[in-house]
Image (spheres, rainbow, N blue to C red):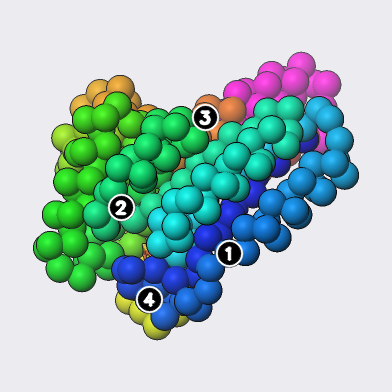
Amino acid sequence: MNYLSYLKTTETCNLNCRHCFTSGTQGRKIFWNTDHVIDFFQRFSEYVGVGNTMHYEFHGGEPFLAPVSDMIRVYDQLRHTFDYTSFGCTSNLTFKLTPDIEDFIQGPLNQRIGTSWDPAIRFANAKQESLWRSNVERLLSLGVTIKLFISVTQDTINIEPIELLRWVRDLGVQELDLERLTNNGNARQHPDIFPRNLDQDQWFLKMHRQIQQHDARSWFANEFMEISMTSLSATSQVQELFAEIANKNCLPSMRMEQ
Ligand code: SF4
């Protein structure tokens, strides 16, 4: 079995994004109990036994509001709990990057980190966005692989898809994922940020066409679009197979739903 566990170091955050499902700065100001976390996962790994993998993802709120020393301790105690164990982190990267944080990203996090950017709903001012950008540039200069998450809000789909992709390419990050909003936390107070499903779908379709038109598939790994394209391709392959079988009268009553 491949397990994935989110380790929430805290419920609170230094930002207050309008779509935050943990309520941003209003999230409960509580931090994890590392003894409990370590004890739970050590017992869990014994319970499930051998032949399993685990990915631990440090999450929040903002995970780096907790002391890095706590994250290192959890890493040290859990790094051998499964046959294959890995660690990741998703951070808003809108704070001063200290040497211990950089070391943690380069060591236990294996030179990888996830971070988010969204138009209009994330940063309270230009200073915050500039701090985030300089931290992204700093980590890229250290050889860190960055996965960028962008939420698909009304403001996002107001951007021409190819312009958004060009912006991501020029930022220099290696991976992109696009995420649909969930109606929790702060997002419940801001219904205006939700795009209509139809508009969202048309925007993705336009992105797909523009990726082909501008040969943008090689710019960076675009996870959402790659999965969509793979699914579409798989769907069409399955349909072709069904059509072939139906043509051979193997399945005379089969009807394919679109
Ligand atoms: S950075 Fe993440 S946790 Fe913090 S307010 Fe924004 S969405 Fe919420």
Give the answer, above or below, for where 131 lies relative to 252: below
1 and 4 marks in contact (CB < 8 Å): no
Q: CA distance from mark 4 to mark 2?
A: 15 Å
Q: Nearer the viewer, residue 241 or 83?
A: 83
Q: Residues within 10 Å of mark 3 (few under 14, many from 20)?
A: few
Q: CA distance from mark 1 to mark 2?
A: 20 Å
Q: CA distance from mark 1 to mark 3?
A: 38 Å
Is the distance from the Cβ of mark 4 to the nearest ligand 1 atom less than 8 Å?
yes
Residue at the (29%, 27%) spot, across then down: 143
Residue 230 tag number? 3
Quarter of the picture containing the C terminus is: top right
Whether residue 176 is visible to the viewer of this picture, yes or no, is no
Q: Name the residue beneath numbered marker 4.
A: 25
The mark closer to the camera, 1 or 3, is 1
Q: Name the residue beneath numbered marker 1.
A: 32
Q: Name the residue beneath numbered marker 2.
A: 93
Q: Residues within 10 Å of mark 2 (few under 14, many from 20)?
A: many
